[in-house]
Amino acid sequence: DAGVTQSPTHLIKTRGQHVTLRCSPISGHKSVSWYQQVLGQGPQFIFQYYEKEERGRGNFPDRFSARQFPNYSSELNVNALLLGDSALYLCATSSGIPTDTQYFGPGTRLTVL
Amino acid sequence: QKEVEQNSGPLSVPEGAIASLNCTYSDRGSQSFFWYRQYSGKSPELIMSIYSNGDKEDGRFTAQLNKASQYVSLLIRDSQPSDSATYLCAVNSDTGGFKTIFGAGTRLFVKA
């Protein structure tokens, strides 16, 4: 079975631009979570979506938004990029049960210049 | 107080020794607990999940959970150089909306 996939792998943007990151879940997984990881820190929770509904949100500004599609894939959008948004963006998927294990994709490395 | 705390390390152990990694969490409503391993430049990969008090063993790895003390640990027996990585503790909670909180990770070095 294919694992979690993310696209693109790497991305370079300039301040003020907008970015869209994509995630496809493991087959059968209905929940997608997004994380931001900066160097030297653990992943920071941004959103979790389950059955196309937002189930949880971390402490991120409104510039960050996400959505989940009927096929359970997901997009993370970040508007008005700041230098501090440079990070590894990770997607993790699970069956949707709150206690269930999440499996991570390879991540998207975003650099904001 | 951070929601999930880990000693950042680095923790250095000789090959064949036991490595002990610790994690404390603040939300008593936390329901499930995970240990992930992350190699430099890669995404986290699951090692263990644990949901109830006590020990859970899987090969060379043992996870221990004590909800009363809000404490989770991971023991790695017969440590190998390939175990050298950052180990992340993660806690799921449904209090005030679902969230998964990660610790900052403990860097482990296994010396050959």
Image (tube, coloured by chain):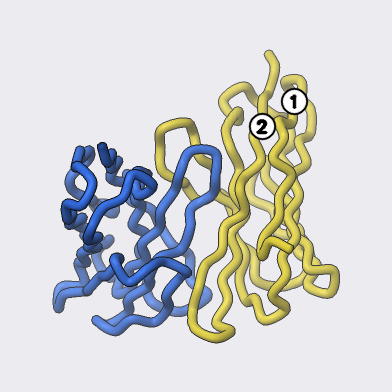
Chain colours: A blue, B yellow
- Residue B17, image x, y percentages: 79, 27
Residue shown at the point (47%, 69%) measured from the top left: A59
- When the figure is inspected, residue A87 is found, relative to residue A26, above or below; the finding is above
Occupied quadrant, residue A61 = bottom left
Badge 1: residue crowd in 10 Å (few <14, some 14–19, many ≥20): few
Say which quadrant the C terminus of chain A sits in: top left
- Residue B43, image x, y percentages: 41, 43
Q: Chain of mark 1?
A: B
Residue placed furthest toward the front: A16
Residue flagged by tag 2: what amino acid is it?
Answer: Leu
Mark 2–mark 1 Cα distance, whole angstroms, equals: 6 Å
Contact (CB < 8 A) between labels 2 and 1? yes
Residue at mark 1: B12
SS at mark 2?
A: strand
- Residue B53, image x, y percentages: 77, 71
- When the figure is inspected, residue B7 is found, relative to residue A24, above or below; the finding is above
Residue placed furthest toward the top: B112
Badge 2: residue crowd in 10 Å (few <14, some 14–19, many ≥20): many
Residue placed furthest toward the right: B69
Residue shown at the point (68%, 13%) measured from the top left: B112
Residue shown at the point (61%, 48%) measured from the top left: B104
Residue shown at the point (37%, 66%) measured from the top left: A33
SS at mark 1?
A: strand
Residue B79 lies left or right of residue B43; in this view the side is right
Residue at mark 2: B108
- Residue A112, image x, y percentages: 27, 41
**Disc on res. B71:** none
